[in-house]
Amino acid sequence: MTASSSSSVALDLAEAAGGKAIADDQPKEGAGLKKRTVNAGLWQSFGFAFDQGLSLVSNIVLVYFALPKEAFGIMAVILIVIQGLQMFSDVGIQPCLIQNKRQDPAFYNTAWTIQVFRGFVLWLIASAIAYPLSLWKGDSELAWLLPLAALTSVFNGFRSTAWITAQRRLDIRLLSILKASFAVVRIGSMALVAWFSPTALALVIGLLVNSLLLCVASHWMIKEIKNRFHFERKAFGELIRYGKWLFLSTVITFFAGQIDKIFLYDLMSAAALGVFFIGSRFAEIGPMFFKQMGQVVGFPALSDVYRRDPERFKVALLKLRLVLTLPINLLLLSMIALGPTVTWLFYGNSPTPGFIEAGWIIQVLCFNSLAGMVTTSYGSVFMASGRTVYNMWSVFAQLVVMVAATLTGYFLAGELGFILGIGLTQWAKYVVDAGLAKRCGCWQWKFDAAVLVTSGTLAIGALWVSDWLAWRFVL
């Protein structure tokens, strides 16, 4: 980075920190796409790293505040329910506003009106199922914690479409600053509540505080966007037509992404789910970053290229995959090598025993994600090219493979076999994603083969390193 670019970034940071709204005179779409994409990637990386770093620290601190494993298990159930309700009602508003050529107030306000209505409906449904769910495993806290946590659906519904417009323009700096700042407040509020009441309430309060602050801040981000209640039949039709396949794919995505936790909660205890939750928080750092970069940077950039210069689409895709996939797979390999040692260092002396068991869970989930980074990148292709039905088939394949692998593993080897089954899911699913990408004309088999073979081989070496580190420092 040159001195001039460094000073430019510093100036942007100062403006964002000082609360300056995103400039009204944004560059036209397509102008300076490479520069805007790089800047968006840097800011997204900063925001994600800061937020995840604080989240991991907060989990460690909460464990040392004697927050029990059951609290993390209950919070995992709450997050599963809220995410499930959101995905069951997702009609693709955000990707449609990013991908569609329309940018007029009627279009955006119709989308915002639908979003607000949806938020209230989700809260009512969550409140209605809270008590029956609390009877399922005898977790009485769910009866009142779930309706409280589900208020985040209302806050998210009122969030301004300016947040989506900033993503469409690849203007990520203020989004990252806001999320990083509110992450500090969120974690501080959780620690304060946990100090007086070491229960799942601390985790729920952090969720609510973060969602409310993001909602309020979104309404002053872009001065020319003022959302009002409005309904236009034509805009509604466009939103539904784009999102009809996304609706089905997001429902299936929920089960594909959460079926492991649902089965764990049904077959085992809240404490076991709590340990899995801690392990997954470490293991999902790389995949979460990849998905966020794909949604916030990759998808808008590829959509821009697809609209304006389709001939460059495959070249842009390969560059994006090189920039994202290789570094994240190196991170995943590092987590395979360090997983047990990291959990021993962080949780070995905690007042609540059992969290160090998350170490081998980290390894299994990271191994699965080595292939997931290859398959997930094709999702941006399907979205940017408007082939949203392909997303549905991709996640449906993941659901089928996940159920078959985990239940077979559980039948053969109990909890160990169940989690090992998760570790094979993305590797088996690659065949389906490769076929769909080939139908799009974007299957990059040489890149895929090189990454999969190299990652699989290095994973074996990482396991050897892990055993040596455990023998040297842990045992």
Image (cartoon, rainbow, N blue to C red):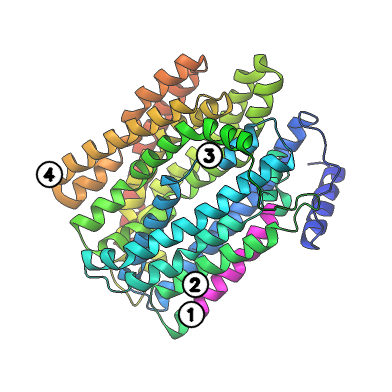
Residue at the left extreme of this rendering: 412
- Disc 3 vs disc 2: which is toward the camera? 3
Asked which quadrant contains residue 36, the reply is: top right
Residue 126 image offset from top left, x and y in percent: 39, 61
Q: Residues within 10 Å of mark 2 (few under 14, many from 20)?
A: many
Q: Secondary structure at mark 2?
A: helix
Check whether the beta carbons of the residues at disc 1 and disc 2 lie within 8 A of each other.
Answer: yes
Q: Nearer the viewer, residue 244 or 264?
A: 244
Q: Which residue is mark 2?
A: 205
The residue under the point 82% across, 41% down is: 26
- From this viewpoint, is residue 42 visible? yes
Q: Secondary structure at mark 1?
A: helix
Residue type, mark 4 in image: Phe
- Disc 3 vs disc 4: which is toward the camera? 3
The residue under the point 39% across, 59% down is: 125
In the image, residue 199 above or below residue 302: below
Check whether the beta carbons of the residues at disc 4 and disc 1 lie within 8 A of each other.
Answer: no
Residue type, mark 3 in image: Gly
Q: Nearer the viewer, residue 42 or 261?
A: 261
Residue 387's disc is none
Give the mark nearest the N terminus, 2 or 4.
2
Residue 92's disc is 3
Q: Which residue is mark 1?
A: 193
Give the mark nearest the N terminus, 3 or 1.
3
Distance between the alpha carbons at the discs numbered 2 and 4: 38 Å
Give the mark nearest the N terminus, 3 or 4.
3
**Residues in magenta, as a range:** 175-192
Give the mark nearest the N terminus, 4 or 1.
1
- From this viewpoint, is residue 338 visible? no
Task: Check residue 281 for magenta coloring.
Answer: no
